[in-house]
Image: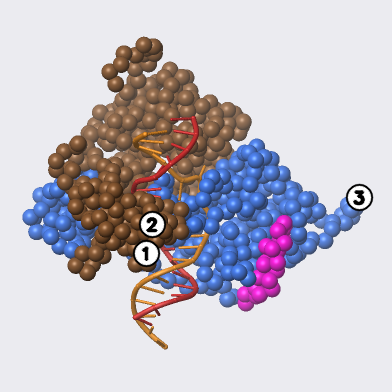
Chain colours: A brown, B blue, C orange, D red
Amino acid sequence: MTAIQTKPRKPAPALPLNTILSGDCIEMMATLPDASVDLVFADPPYNLQLKGALHRPDNSLVDAVTNDWDQFASFAAYDRFTCEWLAQARRVLKPDGAIWVIGSYHNIFRVGAALQDLGYWLLNDVVWRKSNPMPNFRGKRLTNAHETLIWASRAEGAKYTFNYEALKALNEGVQMRSDWTFPICTGGERLKGADGAKAHPTQKPEALLHRVLVATTKPGDVVLDPFFGTGTTGAVAKMLGRDWIGIEREPDYIAAAEARLARVRRVDEGALGITTPKRAEPRVPFGQLVERGMLRPGEELHSINGRHSARVRVDGTLIGRDVKGSIHQVGAALEGAPSCNGWTYWHFRREGQLVPIDLLRQRLRAEMDSSGPN
Amino acid sequence: MTAIQTKPRKPAPALPLNTILSGDCIEMMATLPDASVDLVFADPPYNLQLKGALHRPDNSLVDAVTNDWDQFASFAAYDRFTCEWLAQARRVLKPDGAIWVIGSYHNIFRVGAALQDLGYWLLNDVVWRKSNPMPNFRGKRLTNAHETLIWASRAEGAKYTFNYEALKALNEGVQMRSDWTFPICTGGERLKGADGAKAHPTQKPEALLHRVLVATTKPGDVVLDPFFGTGTTGAVAKMLGRDWIGIEREPDYIAAAEARLARVRRVDEGALGITTPKRAEPRVPFGQLVERGMLRPGEELHSINGRHSARVRVDGTLIGRDVKGSIHQVGAALEGAPSCNGWTYWHFRREGQLVPIDLLRQRLRAEMDSSGPN
DNA sequence: TAATAACATGAATCGCAGG
DNA sequence: ACCTGCGATTCATGTTATT
């Protein structure tokens, strides 16, 4: 496009990329422009209602979440807070953006219902199975060995990023499921303060964020984390070549996150590549195979199951029993199916063997690659 | 207590034990006395919002849940229905009773929030991991491979039954976790109509009910299922020596359930012991080593013979000289071999030594083992 | 009859580019 | 914005048909 824009819009305020905004998440999100962020990842307060201190069987004290940022007067107050930050997040999201929220049974049902009420469209709920959860010391319930993540698009029918092939590759060629197993964040990955105490009570493992970001963002996307904590989201985003914005209220967490992020290196460019779907490959019209002499007009093609056949016409259509049309249309008609991928359905005979016509398409694409785009 | 009751209450109506009540679950629960039931197990409509037909890649049609009973006009209508039946269930429960509700991401967040709003006290959410879920045929989301159960007591501070030791025994001596793995209900267990079609679209596996009832009821307890369907709850309750009450609206489901229940025998006392087969070693996707930071994206791997190398990408694939793909594919391509075991072929460098990546897999398996089979 | 291949199916919110 | 038509997409398990 070279046309001059006659009605220039007010320039959008610049995004504070790769910085931590200090303050309340609702107020700070309000300073961000509409439709500016590709992904929100949020680990909100869990609204835990622990009555007293919790002790292990040996009487040692469990360092539970009792910080005052996690106390809410009632479900109603928690719902109000949840709806406010989720509404801001939705405003800030691009139309094709998406959100992840992680929680436990204490809060995730309120979060999920709020997402639905605000018009988000749920795509999956995902279970993080902890390979090393804290046991239930009292033996009064099941070991709480998982947390739940919700993945939602901005609205019903909206597009969203999902790197299907990359996740399939991560899972050794089998479709990725909705239950993911990772250990909790311990050892060297766990940030400690000067006194050796953990810097944040609920630091998430980087492996979890790695999978979330590889699954639902592209390099260069902007990822917003309104409950940044000690910056796991930012650290993994930086490593994976994504831009990030963090919002955090506690100065101690901000300091820990900034020190952490300064140490993170982006991975090499070549390692950022992911397995890509066929869809991205250039479309090859079937007629080209005929024009290029890879198939003769009049040549007979056979269905994959050997039950049907059709002949190639000079214009790249097929003619079968009472049917004419594209390779897809004729295949669908003969099978009585709603649709058919003619490329994998039809085969031609070479030296007694049945060979799928898709092989010819691949050969053509290889030629196009070596001769550059046309 | 031996004191004579001076104001005798109207004698409670007798409980219709071990029968199916025909009708709407809210109306029928209203006929049951207060505080008369030990456990409610409920599998309510999920309110799926399916738009069009779905076909498998082989063009066969997926037999989806399109029954009228799963249709609701809006979230508000669904919430109203949910709160009404949950309120009746709470009235009918004994003070120390408990409830289980199963659902998917379509409805479980509304159910969980309603439970909390009505005064139930959540004890655990439990994930049913399906070992053989239906795949995502279009590759647009994660395979929806689990459903969620919520276990709640009648009120905060109320007592409830939890057979901790029995569940620990079921789990080979390790505390039972909140994620349970079972196959979906197929084969001989799945009830079929005269036409061979499934009698109910969403029949639950008996193994799931077995664990629920062993965990949270005692022999002789009364179990109420307000969405009885074809009677899985009743069948397992009868087998385990619990009393049951079913409520169901559809005459066809009632007929199927009654025929089924007539065939069920209570197990002999002491016959409950089971032997569990030794598990195969869990499959570990190579991508997990990357997500978990055991290998860096961009890190170089070397072939066992030192002749070839390749770099790790963020999605767990390798990129070598003109080849991309899994550790096995790239190894095979570089060697010109038909196949290759990437786990033993590829090595990484640590302190000058070449170490096989299989060592990292073994480390990961050790972690997974410690979390129990479930 | 045994081994093997082919077929069937499960609570699913399952396109998208180009004209 | 609507409409047309290409063409991408599946895992585990149980049952039936075939060799």
Residue at 23% of width from left, 51% of height from top?
Answer: A290
Would you identify the image quadrant in which residue B243 lies?
bottom right
Residue picked out by circle 3: B7
Residue A315 appears in the rendering: yes
Graded by Cα atoms within 10 Å as few (under 14), some (14 to 19) or many (20 or more), the crowding at tag 2 reads many
Give whichever of A320, B267 is nearer the camera: A320
Instruction: Determine whether label 3 and label 2 are within 8 Å by CB.
Output: no
Residue B11: give x, y in percent of width and height.
88, 56
Label 3 resides on the chain identified as B
Work out how far the residue at label 2 is from the one at label 1, CA to CA, in angstroms. 9 Å
With A158 as the anchor, is B16 left or right in this view? right
Instruction: Determine whether label 2 and label 1 are within 8 Å by CB.
Output: yes
Q: Dot 3: what SS?
A: loop
* Amino acid type at image mark 1: His
Residue picked out by circle 2: A331
- Tell me where the magenta segment starts and ends, as one range: B244-268
Give whichever of A300, C11 is nearer the camera: A300
* Amino acid type at image mark 2: Gly
Q: Quadrant of the N terminus of chain B?
A: bottom right
Q: Nearer the viewer, mark 3 or mark 2?
A: 2
Work out how far the residue at label 1 is from the one at label 3, CA to CA, in angstroms. 84 Å
Residue B361 appears in the rendering: no
Instruction: Name the N-terminal-most of marks 2 and 1.
Output: 1
The number of numbered discs placed on residues in the rendered structure image is 3
* Amino acid type at image mark 3: Lys
Label 1 resides on the chain identified as A
Residue at 66% of width from left, 51% of height from top?
Answer: B69
